[in-house]
Image (tube, rainbow, N blue to C red):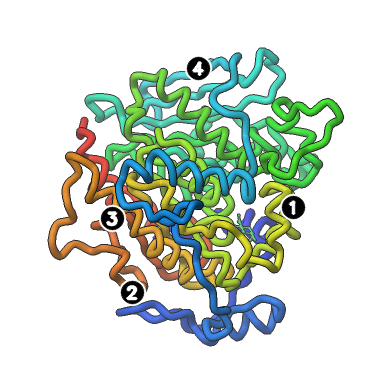
Amino acid sequence: MAKNRLLIPLLAIMTAGYLRAEGPTGSEGSGWEASRKLAEELAKRQPEINYFEEKVPKYTLPDPLLMSNGHRVGDARTWQTKRRAEILELFLANVYGRAPVGRPQIMTFEVFELDRKALGGIATRKQVTVYFTENKEGPSMDILIYLPNAAKAAVPTMLILNFGGNHAIHADPSIKLSKSWMRGGDKGAGDNRATEQSRGRDYSSYPVEKILKRGYGLATIYYGDLDPDFADGFKNGVHAVFDKSADGSRPGDAWGSIGAWAWGLSRAMDYFETDSDIDCNRIVVLGHSRLGKTALWAGAQDERFAMVVSNDSGCGGAALSRRQFGETVERINKSFPHWFCENFKKYNGREDDLPVDQHMLIALIAPRPVYVASADEDLWADPRGEFLACKNAAGVYRLLDVNQPGRPRLPAGRFDVETLEMPGLNQPIQQGKIGYHIRSGSHALTEYDWERYMDFADLHLSSRGKNF
Ligand code: GCU
C-alpha cells in the first residue's frame, strides 16, 4: 500500500474533525467491528461525538421505493420516470442546493497543451482549460488528462477532483502549476498560492502509471478552480458568476460548494463528449472525503457518468445521517457552512426530520455501478453507516436489474450487498452493482483503494466494450 503522503500536508489542516489513535484496529475476518480502544480514545478527545454502536439512536429510514403519494414503486419505469425525480428534488431542495441546469451557453474548451509522448512515452498528456463564460479571466478550470498510449481506441477514464492542484498529483514538470487560491499556499509562499514545492506531493493518492497500465485514463481538476474551499458568502468561484439575484440574496436551496464542485465534474463530462480519445460512455467519477461526497452528488444527478466511487466520504456522502455516529449534520454545517445549501441547516440535530437519507443518494445512481469504500480507523466517517447506506439502496438496484429488458438477472451465488452483513477488513464485495470495502488504515485514498475500483470497473464496464 502506498504511503499516504497526501495525509501529511493536507489532512492536518483540512480534516480537523478526523482524529487518529494508536492501538489495535478493527477485526479481520467476518464482520468488521470498530476497535473499542480507538472509539474510547476518540470519545475522550471529542466527548460531544458518538463513537459507540450502542449509542446509535433508533431510527427509521425513508423508503426509497415509496412514492410521496403513498404508492409503492413496483417497476423500473415508475422509478425512472417518477420516483427518481422526486428523490432528486428532495436532495436539491434540502441538502446540496440547486446548481444552474445544463451546460452554460457560452462555454469553451482550449487544449492548451498536448504531448503524445509523455511520461517516457507511455502516455498522452492533455491539459484543457474550460472557460465557463466569455471572460478569459475566469472563472475557469484546468483539466489534466493522461491517457495510455497502449490503448487502441477511446479510453475509459477515471475523473477525480484533487485537493492540491493538478501539479501536485505527479512530479511531471510539464503540468501547469496551479495559480488558483490554495489553502495555506506552499510553505514560505504565505499567500495562498502554490509553488514548485508541491509538485508531485500527493502522488501516492494518484498512482498515474498504475492506472494507465490497467488501461484507464486519468483526468483530474483542482477543486478550488471551481470554488475555493472557504466560507466567503459565495463571492468567488463559479457562484460569483452564476448566482444572479438582483439584491444579492441567496435562496435556501441555492447551491453550496459541493454543488459547485459537482457541477464542474459535469462540465468536464461536456468536454469528454468532444474528445474522441476518451470513451465518454465509460467515465468513472470518483472522489475522496469531501470530494467523495461531491462524486456521489455528481453521479446521482448526471447519468452520463457510467460508474461512481466514494472513498471515505462520510457525513453528507455515503454515511447515513440518522445514525449520528461520528460527524453529524449539525457538526458538518457548523464547521463547513458553505458546503451544503442553507436549508440543510434546518436539520441540525433533527436528522429524523430529513425527507431523505444518504442511501437514497446511492439509489439515484442505480442501475449504474457504484462503489463505496471506508477505512478501519476512519470512525469520523462512520464506516458502518456507509455500508448500511449501500445495503438500503440495494432494493432499488434489484428492482432495476430485474425489470430492465436485456439486463441479466443476478447469477446464482453472486454477492448481493442487500443480503450481506458488513464484510471483514480488506474483503471487498465486488460482484454486484454495489461494491464495498473497508480497508485497514486511516482516512486516505490509497493504491489499495484504486486497485479495487479498477477491478470493479473491469467487471462492470467491460460489457460496454473493451478497447485495449
Ligand atoms: C473534514 C470533514 C469531513 C470531510 C473531510 C475531508 O474532516 O469533517 O466531512 O469529509 O474533512 O474532506 O477531508
Mark sitting earlier along the chain (1/3): 1
Ligand 1 in which quarter: bottom right
Residue at 38% x, 41% y: name it: 80
Mark sitting earlier along the chain (1/4): 4
Q: Which kind of residue does numbered mark 1 sit on?
A: Pro
Location of residue 213 in the rendering, given as x and y in whole percent from the top left corner: 29, 40
| Number of the front mark, 4 or 3 | 3
Q: Mark 1 points at which residue?
A: 337
Judge whether residue 165 can be spotted in this image: yes
Real-space CA distance between mark 3 and mark 2, rounded to the nearest whole angstrom: 17 Å
Q: Is residue 311 left or right of residue 166?
A: left
Location of residue 175 in the rendering, given as x and y in whole percent from the top left corner: 53, 30
Q: Kindly indicate the quadrant of the structure image that contains residue 45.
A: bottom right
Mark sitting earlier along the chain (3/2): 3
- Front in this rendered view, residue 276 or 13: 276
Q: Mark 4 points at which residue?
A: 111
Are the residues at dot 2 and dot 4 in contact (C-beta closer than 8 Å)?
A: no
- Front in this rendered view, residue 98 or 232: 98
Mark sitting earlier along the chain (1/2): 1
Mark sitting earlier along the chain (2/4): 4
Are the residues at dot 1 and dot 4 in contact (C-beta closer than 8 Å)?
A: no
Location of residue 277 in the rendering, given as x and y in whole percent from the top left corner: 34, 22
Q: Name the residue under label 3.
A: 398
Q: Which kind of residue does numbered mark 3 sit on?
A: Arg
**Residue 137 vertical position relative to residue 224 in the rendered view, above or below:** above
Real-space CA distance between mark 1 and mark 2, rounded to the nearest whole angstrom: 35 Å
Residue at 33% x, 56% y: name it: 434
Q: Mark 2 points at which residue?
A: 421
